[in-house]
Amino acid sequence: MVADAVERASQESFTHDAPKTLQGQINFLMRTMKTAKAIAEEIGVTADSVNRYRRGTRKNPPKQIADRIEVAVKTRWQPRVRQRAKKKAATSTGITVEARAYFGYHAPIGTTDEARPRRITAHLSPEYARRLFDAQKGIGTQTPNEVIAEGLQKEYFQDYGRRASGLEVEFTGIDYIDFKF
């Protein structure tokens, strides 16, 4: 779920729209993936169907196939623009997290530690953006959820150490999550 949210956020940095016509999408995929067979395996059709889409003899794929084609195009569209946006987030601007999830706490005696749903929007520093992107690549020991939980703990719940110093946040049961960077 976190990986999908990061992918959606990176797609917001596009400088040009991805191809919208079926023929344009298939031609773009042919340039990036090189063979009809590779495209066919990705979208779940035969190589002949891909060639028919490319030539324009088949113009209306089933909705499910059309959605797969669109996802395949958007995941490959403007990779350098996306990398530049991620690099900027990881070095200077940070990321904004909007989530509705269950937040549980390990807190001092006398307070509740029962997880409850909350909707939170918070801006996290570039350090957490870098660590989130690294965790997605498998670098380090933390998962993306743990990085987000730590970032929200330090920057939202503890307000950089000004309150709730003994609080440890758990970030589970994600209903939805979105990022902006």
Image (cartoon, rainbow, N blue to C red):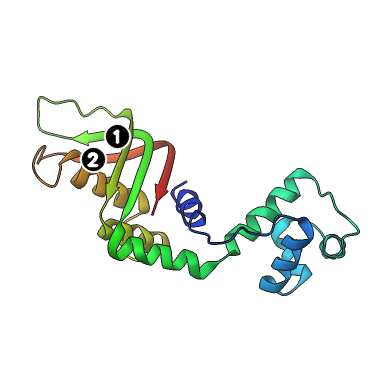
Residue designated by label 1: 103
How far across and down, in percent of the image, does residue 173 sit?
39, 35
User: Which element type, helix, strand or loop, lies under badge 2?
Assistant: strand
Task: For label 2, count other residues whose C-alpha is less than 10 Å away and answer few (under 14), some (14-19) or many (20+).
Answer: many
Residue type, numbered disc 2:
Val
Of residues 109 and 169, the one drawn nearer to the viewer in this rendering: 169
How far across and down, in percent of the image, does residue 153 sit?
21, 43
Residue designated by label 2: 169
Quarter where residue 24 is shown:
bottom right
Quarter where residue 63 is shown:
top right
In the rendered image, is residue 138 in sight?
Answer: no
Name the residue: 10% across, 33% down.
108
Name the residue: 88% across, 55% down.
58
Name the residue: 48% across, 58% down.
13
Closer to the N terminus: mark 2 or mark 1? Answer: 1
User: What is the CA distance from the residue labelled 2 to the residue labelled 1?
Assistant: 7 Å
Quadrant containing the C terminus is bottom left
How far across and down, in percent of the image, does residue 38 sit?
72, 68
In the rendered image, is residue 181 in sight?
Answer: yes
* Residues at marks 2 and 1 touching, judged by CB atoms closer than 8 Å: yes
The extreme front residue here reads: 16
Q: Is residue 66 above or below residue 158?
A: below
Quarter where residue 100 is shown:
top left
Q: Is residue 51 above or below residue 8?
A: below
